[in-house]
Amino acid sequence: AFNSTQFCSSNNNSSSSSKNICHCEAATTNKESQSAKLTATTPYNEEDDNEQDNLPIYRMSQVANFNGQLSPSNPNKRIWMSYGGLVYDVTEFVANHPGGSEKILMGAGGAIEPYWYLYRQHFASDLPLNLLSKMLIGQLHPADQDRIDEQMENVTEQTPDPYEHEPQRNAQLIVHGDTPMNAEVPQGVITERYLTPNELFYIRHHHPVPYLSEGELEEFRLEVDLTLMFPDALMKRKRAAAEEGGGGDDDEEEEEALSATTAVDIVRRETTDTTTSTSCSNSVVAKLSLDQIKSLPKVELTSTLQCSGNRRGGFNGLRQTSGTPWGQGAISTAKWGGARLIDVLMLAMEQVSKDDQTFSDEEKKEKKMKSSSLIETLHSLQALIDNHPELQHLRFESLDGMLASIDANKGLNPFGDVIVAYEMNGEDLPRDHGYPLRVIVPGYAAVRNVKWLKKLELAEEEAEGTWQRGLNYKILPPTVLDAKEVDLNRMPGLSEECVFSGITKVENLSHTVPLPTTAFEEEIFGSMSMMPFAGSRTPLTPGETVLVKTSGWAYAGGGRNIVRVDVTGNNGKSWQTATITEGSNQPLRRAWAWVFWECEVPAIVCEDGVSVYRVGL
């Protein structure tokens, strides 16, 4: 029987139904509970069974031929995969994979069960299975599927469950999926406090939360790769990278090794690669302890973080989207404490200069950087930029393997206010929000505010990988419905966010008026869509106009100030200007946080006599 607490949300407010989505062989109370024999299925349909019985049967060796690589058996570079005893041709879907093409290609020519075991967001809704059903081309030979099932059973016996060290979460959060955790703030809670309490801050994860033992924390060092500033070392690294990618006779051996890879191997690789150093011998890397970073001048800033997909769920009424169907609660604000990113870079440069014996004393003196006055900082940065015009990006790497970057103009600008944070609302960073270190890049999409920071690097190009160059983080025209129609490499990646806003409360003079709901909102928020009544109710006449008080939030991104909020209660026939109640005193063009607002507007009563037409911004 399927246990919803392991692979899907068990929260009653979740937007996703866990029925008939996936099956697990055991309960979740012991080692056997992590049984990885996962078989996703849509609701049973006898016609589907009959169609599948008539499909050709393939051996796994045949599937392996279609791995996207040109070969005599695969002249068109097709991409096949198997799952749950069925074979799929995913070639046309790869470019549109929400997690990025490089992620889905990891399973090319093989079974995807081990990947879905790790990336369990595939079980949060029936969308992945519905998509796969359109790509079905055959059945996998039962003997091959039996071997896959046996390997998946071995996964839980030979590898620890990657989600066994997850933090406790607040029950008020609306959970869209818990492995990995994706949860938003309830609509009625968003504007209760200007600073979101740590336990109610929205959560957006791509992997299990990294867990560091006491010993690992003591040994933790932030790696700062400064190779770009040292031409000889940079040239050596590029030469080494070119030699590694040169191919040759080892390619056949690698192909044979990959063909023998088991599910256990895949899970181990995916869960251990995230904690190994990516620095090579040709890199110039400083390693900074937490104490060293905390010894730098501490700064605090209030910044709003928002998932770039916030309010995505509202589009599903128009056309189905493929990401997490957020309501308006994938946004929160905190006061972050830490060291300026610029100061961290200067400290790293100082350490490297002291350790490097190739510099003369005079060169060390010239290159030495330290936390100092603004004037000295600006001079040092100007010299850095003048001497290294190739420095265009700052790359970040997380303990969970996530890679992202920001442009150097933002990261090195003293007025960009980028910090390496170790505190959140006056406390150590919670594990869910980046402990022990995270980057705060105010005004940018939350995905650029990398949690669990392990490494930062001066770079010529933006970060590789899904979270920087993948489909989900590209800015596409609204007319593009298929990513194959555009060259994603030419499309800009997401950085600054645009204007977002939300209405969290609507009150009549004597009681709270329920917000009218769509089927989607009822599924997402449940009772939260209907605001609770305050005091006695007064009968309302459909079509009459009543005066209501409405309130909510607005956020501009990019440091842009919200200077006015306009509200309508009659579908745009008239507008009223709201009063900004909090957040209006932020510095010009450095408004890193949201504003709260409230407004009295005339609104028309709906036919049900208990709600008003949707108040709009």
Image: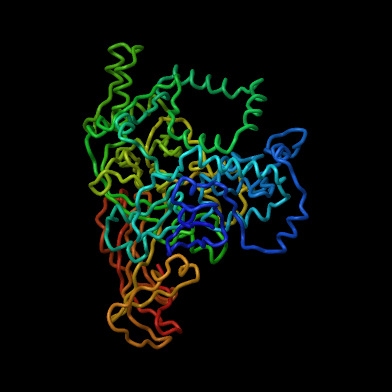
Give 75 or 2, whichever is nearer the viewer: 2
x, y (%) of residue 447?
A: 42, 46
Give 321 or 151, whichever is nearer the viewer: 151
x, y (%) of residue 20?
A: 57, 61
Q: Quadrant of the C terminus?
A: bottom left
Q: Quadrant of the N terminus?
A: bottom right
491 in relation to 373, above or below: below
Q: Which of the 4 image quarters holds residue 561? A: bottom left
Give 214 or 129, whichever is nearer the viewer: 214
- Write the residue at 39% across / 58% down: 184
x, y (%) of residue 155?
A: 53, 40
Q: Which of the 4 image quarters holds residue 582? A: bottom left
| Colour scheme of the rendered structure | rainbow
234 with respect to 253 (left or right): left
341 in relation to 47, above or below: above
- Write the residue at 34% across / 32% down: 216
x, y (%) of residue 585?
A: 24, 55
How many numbered markers are drawn?
0
35 in relation to 253, above or below: below
Give 493 or 590, whichever is nearer the viewer: 493
